[in-house]
Amino acid sequence: MARARRIGHAPRYADYDGASFAPVGGAIEVVTSLVPWQGELLAGGLFSHAGSVYSPGIASWNGTRWKAILTEFGSDEHTVPGVYGLAATPTHLYANGWFNRI
């Protein structure tokens, strides 16, 4: 049975391959939702960067690196946008959270 534990720079998320845990990319402050979509893993949460990539609130992991989904996604100039939940269909991605522009 898998159990959560802190691993290096993966404080709130990790990849479990059936035998061991491994970090996923660089650190993200707070991850609240993970969902596979179009062959990549999307992370939503309360963050401004995914690893070293500026990607406020939502980022995509392709197995090698993080990339930004929307760099203009946000709330206001003083608040980091937050994605609390993600849901996906083959053609659409849905996000709920704290933001007022996309």
Image: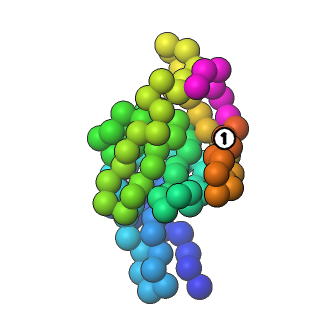
Q: Residue furthest top?
A: 77
Report helix, strand or loop for mark 1: strand
Give the residue drawn at x 42%, y 74%. Answer: 21
Is residue 46 toward the left or the right of residue 89 in the image?
left
Q: Is residue 74 above or below residue 40?
A: above
Q: Closest to the observer: 91 or 102? A: 91
Q: Amino acid at mark 1?
A: Ala
Q: Is residue 58 above or below residue 60?
A: above
- Most common SS among magenta residues: loop
x and y percentages locating residue 97 in the rendered image: 67, 34
The residue that disc 1 covers is 95
Give the residue drawn at x 59%, y 34%. Answer: 82
Q: Closest to the observer: 15 or 5? A: 15
What segment carries the magenta color?
Answer: 97-102
Write down the quadrant of residue 3 in the picture: bottom right
Give the residue drawn at x 53%, y 27%. Answer: 73
